[in-house]
Amino acid sequence: MGLLIKGGEIVTVGSRASADIYCEGETITRIGRGLDAPPGTEVIDAAGKMVFAGFIDPHVHIYLPFMATFAKDTHETASVAALIGGTTTYIEMCCPNRNDDALAGYELWKSKAEGKSACDYAFHMSVTKFVKETEDQLTRIVKDGTSSFKIFLAYKNFFGVDDAEMYHTLTLAKRLGVITTAHCENAELVAQLQQHLLAEGKTGPEWHEPSRPESVEAEGTGRFATFLENTGAAGYVVHLSCEKALQAAMAAKARGVRISVESVLPHFLLDKTYAERPGVEGMKHVMSPPLREKKNQAVLWNAVARGFVDTIGTDHCPFDTEQKLLGKDAFTNIPNGIPGIEDRVNLLYSYGVKTGKIDLDRFVDAASTRAAKLFGLFPRKGTIAVGSDADLVVYDMDYRGAVSAKTQHVNCDYNGFEGMKIEGRPSVVTVRGKVQVRDGKFVGERGRGMMLKREAIH
Ligand code: URP
Ligand code: ZN
Ligand code: ZN
């Protein structure tokens, strides 16, 4: 049975047009005005609404053993939450730690998703050590369609790599034509500052930010860029949080380094005073890099508007209140992370587009198209075109509501954006031609999602 999305305003990067979209099977096959459709076609009235390509979250954690616990979501819960919020594809960080075997880790992460996700998904493969079998294993993983790496310059002795390992990873990435994403903070400085603060009796969540100040992130960003420059590899800074780090990335870009930048939802809407709230309320807002001084928010919005920040992801990583309390005696034990997968699109639309900070073009680009291009998914994903997957979001700009843990689908007992008003939400969301969401409710097929195999394009 076909699917006809009728009379909406189709918004893609560089174009807006009133037209119908006809989908046959999993694919968009016709776009035009007044399209006819065979009997039995499912028709969705999109008049008065905008139609976007399904949004892409380029940075999520779903299965994640980390800081003595596990992130709370499964692919069943995270994918439903993603879809309700308009995200039809996510890229999960596959994160075996330094003691794990990379290939075994990759198979484990795949097994956690297979047949479970209601939306499509892919992986960034973390390289958390570089030993004799690494080259062969990573080559096999890239051949399997996972064509992006992840390195952590932070999290010493767990996920973190040293400079030699970063060099070998980037050299291999360059040879294989894959892009390397990087968490950029200086691990040694963080470790030393943490011990110094704890020794002074500074144990609360408000000390998390001073233990990883902006200069520590700027150093990591600059060092990553220098390694890109000297290996010729393509790189992508994840969850950039502040002006100093942005300057380091932009300085590298200006001298021709192949570097792209992601920032994530919390850094646009929350600031460090959230983590300074007493007790567990502060702990709920502990993530890395940490929430920063408010003045950085305007810098980040402006950088998105001008295309200096390429993408906006979430770094979705839910830990509930009980897990956050693992850090009640020392901020260094608070599991780092905050959920966001369900709210990203609506909050960016409400606080970015509606307030005039970014235009619709950049909204669509930063929240889907640019990620599709950087990570080898375009034009199958990230745009509305004949031949693209029929992942569509019919967006109701008249909807009014608020973010709340009480109504969310993410598996977490709090929402870091609690109470924020939203002005718009998806009324229909499709995944490869099948309606998965209607008006905030999941109505589709669980387990429909498939792993997306991606070419090495860098
Ligand atoms: O605080 C964070 N960001 N938690 C998830 C792990 C990471 O660094 O991305
Ligand atoms: Zn990170
Ligand atoms: Zn992350």
Image (cartoon, rainbow, N blue to C red):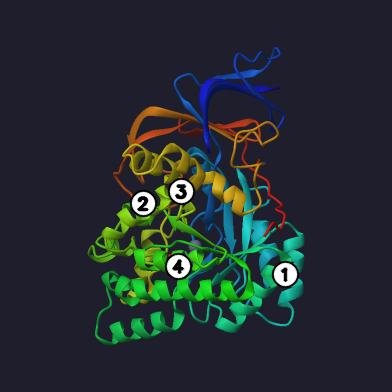
Callouts 2 and 4 close, C-beta under 8 Å = no
Q: Which residue is mark 1?
A: 175
Q: Amino acid at mark 3?
A: Val
Q: Secondary structure at mark 4?
A: helix
- Name the residue located 30 percent from the left edge and 44 percent from the top edge: 420
Residue 70 visible here: no
Residue 93 visible here: yes
**Sequence-first tag of 2 and 4:** 4
Is label 4 or label 1 in front? 4
Crowding at dot 3, Cα within 10 Å, few <14 / some 14-19 / many 20+, comes out as: many
Quadrant placement of the N terminus: top right
**Sequence-first tag of 2 and 1:** 1
Image quadrant where residue 259 sits: bottom right
**Sequence-first tag of 4 and 1:** 1
The image position of residue 322, as x and y in percent, is 37, 63
Q: Which residue is mark 3?
A: 410
Q: Which residue is mark 2?
A: 302
Q: Amino acid at mark 2?
A: Asn
Alpha carbon of mark 4 to alpha carbon of mark 1: how far? 25 Å
The image position of residue 232, as x and y in percent, is 63, 70
Q: Amino acid at mark 1?
A: Arg
Disc marking residue 251:
4
The image position of residue 171, as x and y in percent, is 67, 74
Crowding at dot 2, Cα within 10 Å, few <14 / some 14-19 / many 20+, comes out as: some
| Callout 4: CB less than 8 Å from ligand 2 | no
Alpha carbon of mark 3 to alpha carbon of mark 2: how far? 30 Å
